[in-house]
Amino acid sequence: MELIDENGNLFGTVNVVDALAVCLVLAVVVAGVAAVGTLGAGEKTETDEPAVETRYATIDLGTQLSSTADGISVGDEMTHDDHPHTLTVTDVYAAPVSNGETHVTVRTEVEGTQFENGTYAFGDAEFATGHNVSVGTEAYDATGTIETVEDEGTELSLAETDVLLEATLSPSAAADIRVGDEVTFGNDTVATVERVSVYPVGDQRHRVFVGATLTTLERGADLRYGHASVESGSTIPLSTADYDLAFDALEMGVIEEAGEPATTTVEIDLEKLSDREASLFEPGLTETAGDETWATIQDVEREPASVIVETENGELHEREHPTRDDVTLTVELQTRETALGPRFKGDALDNGDTVYLDFGVTSVEERVWLVDN
């Protein structure tokens, strides 16, 4: 069969002119569909473009070298090379934790992308609580953990917190601690020593109670000083120009020990002392530490010590020792009176308790017997 017959019909049935007309119509329809599809795709991309939105984040940068921490300041800005994103430091909380190291937390304003699925991103990475993020400028580069991401708030939530601290230190270390000592970062004071009590409790051991006011970072119902939670049992560092010390937190909201200042008189029995040993004790002798007097000898009674001797026939007799003396000390202690009784050097004081007293020329560690005043 011929493709086009003598009458101009295609395959002998369809007129060639009609066929061309049909093809033309189909081409127009296809082109129209393609055009509509292209426009539709363009409109959808514009509508669904993720929005750049502002969030406020608290970032724990951890413990940094103090030289690095000193360079972190409000106004520091970090931009992303591939996205219209910025991260700006709006607040800084830093507490020295040792000589040369400082713990840093920052508040930041973040310009990132908010996606329809709820994900918020800075650069190519998700920006959410618990994720790590790098914060850096030309001066420093630090990696921290995102603690909160919120819709508002440029400043960190800080509080002034009183705390009673305790540590057992060498006499020289204890002597370095003074009322008025400050822990500083830049121009900010983050801790101040308000009260100090130093008690000799053993050979070359002093028990130190420090009442301090800390600038703490609020994390919900919790408080943090540097990297440490401020709660009973936690370890709180105090790093000043003169010392780096760690203390146990005993109680929050107070800066001094329980009870009211009082005096308690006790007797101490010392047996079979040599003449040289006995002669060291005399009325007026004091135990002093931290510019405070904690014990004063009021009276000294001395008598020959007793010794049991056996005669030739086996009988036992009590005799005076020829070279040894028994000594009874009456000592006034500076205590704190509580509803549960007196406390001395931070511990409860009762009949039969053993105390350590350092009178300089000599020391004793013996049981005491309370004297009714």
Image: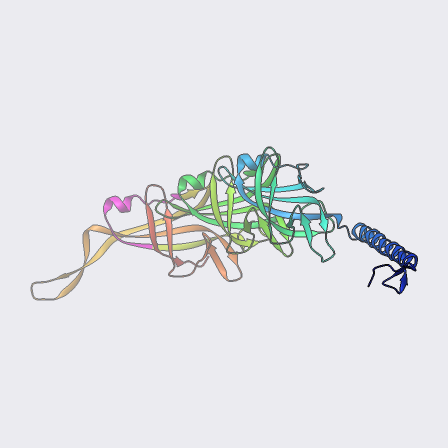
Question: From this viewpoint, which residue is outermost toward the top?
Answer: 139
| Magenta segment boundaries in residue numbering | 269-286
Q: Quadrant of residue 360?
A: top left
Q: In the rendered view, would you say 157 is above or below 136?
A: below
At horizontal 87% and vertical 64% (from top left) the residue drawn is 12
| Residue 28 in view, yes or no | yes
**Residue 7 position within the rendered picture, expressed as x and y whole percent measured from the top left:** 92, 60
- In the image, 320: left or right of 194? left
- In the image, 298: left or right of 46? left
| Residue 159 in view, yes or no | no
Q: In the rendered view, would you say 207 is above or below 371?
A: above
Instruction: Classify the position of the N terminus by image quarter.
Output: bottom right
Residue toward you, 175 or 291: 175
At horizontal 55% and vertical 39% (from top left) the residue drawn is 183
Question: From this viewpoint, which residue is outermost toward the bottom?
Answer: 314
At horizontal 41% and vertical 39% (from top left) the residue drawn is 172
At horizontal 91% and vertical 58% (from top left) the residue drawn is 8
**Residue 274 position within the rendered picture, expressed as x and y whole percent measured from the top left:** 23, 48
**Residue 29 position within the rendered picture, expressed as x and y whole percent measured from the top left:** 88, 57
Reply yes or no: does residue 216 show up in magenta. no
Q: How is the image coloured?
A: rainbow
**Residue 136 position within the rendered picture, expressed as x and y whole percent measured from the top left:** 61, 38
Q: How many marks?
A: 0
Q: Quadrant of residue 318?
A: bottom left
Residue toward you, 329 or 229: 229
Question: From this viewpoint, which residue is outermost toward the left?
Answer: 312
